[in-house]
Amino acid sequence: MRVAVAGVEKSVTSDFDVDVTTGVVTFVPGHVPPAGAAVTAGYLFDVPVRFDTDTLEIDLAAFEAGEIPKIPLIELLD
């Protein structure tokens, strides 16, 4: 998790804490942003998926290089 205030990145635990189960960010006393300051955040999370097809289309047009133009995935829901 990354958090910035007015474009300046802050440090987890010294500037803010995050509850990883809820995603709630709480700034620690003395590090609360001033009113009107832009607060932005970036997240990394995992989503369980499976392949949508049994085959993948691979383009091997170049020597020792290839590309997979699309990999169809489906999200696994509980």
Image (cartoon, helix red, strand yellow):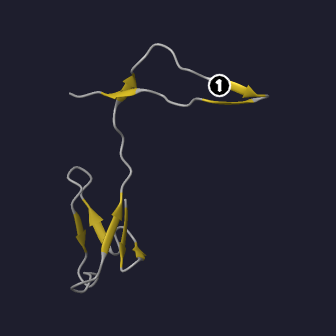
The quadrant where residue 67 appears: top right
Q: To which residue does mark 1 refer?
A: 59
Q: Residue at x 34, y 37 (%)?
A: 47
The location of residue 73, given as percent across then percent down, is: 39, 27
In the picture, the quarter occupied by the N terminus is bottom left
Q: Residue at x 61, y 23 (%)?
A: 58
Q: Residue at x 23, y 81 (%)?
A: 29
Q: Is 9 positioned to the left or the right of 32 in the image?
A: right
The quadrant where residue 25 appears: bottom left
Q: Is 78 positioned to the left or the right of 6 in the image?
A: left
The location of residue 78, given as percent across then percent down, is: 20, 27
Residue at the farthest front position: 61
The location of residue 8, given as percent across then percent down, is: 42, 78
**Residue type at numbered disc 1:** Asp
Q: Is 68 positioned to the left or the right of 64 in the image?
A: left
Nearer to me, 5 or 29: 5
Placement of 47 over or under 74, stated as above or below: below
Q: Is 7 positioned to the left or the right of 61 in the image?
A: left
Placement of 31 over or under 58, stated as above or below: below
The quadrant where residue 7 appears: bottom left
Nearer to me, 36 or 25: 36
The location of residue 37, given as percent across then percent down, is: 28, 82
Secondary structure type for disc 1: strand
Residue at the farthest right position: 63
